[in-house]
């Protein structure tokens, strides 16, 4: 396993994102909607650095098999409480083609939220198929399949504390 982004760089960048989010939301309550399972390490590292009140929600969708997203999303686990009228922040591990988040964004917007923003730890801009506005991006990376810090390859490597790739 090769290290692409080490623990120190991840923590430092998440610090910066947290500060930016605090500034943007001005003490307002934020409802975090994490996309399971990949969001988990980033979700917690981000949430614990933000002083605003944060509500925790999660959604699990599948859109991905092997290394390519299919475009259709299926909801395996839906958000459990009403999110109407809330400031929603979607928390994701990585945006690749943008298909998953485009579909999910539309779905969440239909629930009548006050506003909706996106925070992703990683983004692969060269792979984007769907144009998508993303407010908070941790790192833009080249077109490489990465694992660790929540990201998996066939459900493995999620628990690595860094972002790595296999040659
Ligand atoms: P998209 O719909 O193509 O943007 O795919 C987004 C989803 O694909 C992410 O939530 C990840 O679960 C998965 N994904 C995309 N690229 C990678 C990668 O390099 N490693 C692991 N998972 C990835
Ligand atoms: Mg994902």
Image (cartoon, helix red, strand yellow):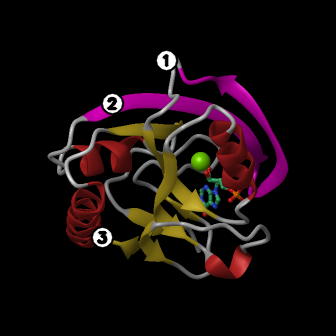
Q: Which mark is residue 126?
A: none
Marks 2 & 1, CB-CB < 8 Å contact: yes
- Mark 1 beta carbon near ligand 2 (under 8 Å): no
Q: Is residue 31 visible?
A: yes
In this view of the protein, can residue 92 be seen by the observer?
no
Judged left or right of residue 160, residue 85 is right
What SS does tag 2 mark?
A: strand
Q: Nearer the viewer, residue 167 or 32?
A: 32
Which residue shows up at 72% across the image and 54% down it?
A: 102
- Precedes in sequence: disc 2 or disc 1: 2
Q: Is residue 128 left or right of residue 53?
A: right
Q: Nearer the viewer, residue 18 or 30?
A: 30
Occupied quadrant, residue 166: bottom right
x and y percent of residue 131 in the render? 73, 71
Numbered tag placed on residue 55 in the rendering: 2
* Cβ of mark 3 under 8 A from ligand 1: no
Q: Is residue 162 magenta?
A: no
Who is closer to the viewer here, 140 or 3? 140
- Image point (44%, 29%), residue name: 57
Q: Which residues are magenta?
A: 54-79
Magenta span: predominant SS is strand
Q: Residues within 10 Å of mark 1 (few under 14, many from 20)?
A: few
Q: Residue at x 74, y 57 (%)?
A: 67
- Labelled disc at residue 81: 1
Q: Position of residue 163 (x, y in %)?
A: 41, 64
Residue designated by label 3: 6
Q: Earlier in the sequence, mark 3 or mark 2?
A: 3
């Amino acid at each position: 396993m090769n290290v692409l982004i080490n623990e120190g760089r991840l923590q430092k960048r998440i610090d910066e994102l947290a500060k930016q989010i605090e500034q943007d939301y001005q003490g307002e309550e934020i409802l975090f909607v994490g996309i399971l399972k990949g969001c988990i390490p980033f979700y917690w590292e981000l949430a614990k650095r933000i002083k605003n009140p944060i509500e925790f929600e999660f959604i699990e969708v599948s859109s991905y098999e092997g290394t390519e997203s299919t475009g259709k999303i299926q909801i395996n686990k839906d958000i459990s409480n009403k999110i109407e009228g809330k400031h929603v922040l979607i928390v994701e591990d990585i945006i690749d083609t943008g298909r998953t988040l485009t579909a999910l964004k539309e779905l969440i917007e239909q629930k009548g939220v006050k506003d909706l923003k996106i925070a992703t730890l990683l983004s692969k801009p060269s792979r984007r198929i769907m144009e998508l506005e993303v407010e908070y991006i941790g790192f833009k990376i080249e077109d490489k399949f990465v694992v660790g810090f929540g990201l998996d390859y066939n459900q493995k490597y999620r628990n690595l504390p860094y972002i790595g790739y296999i040659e």
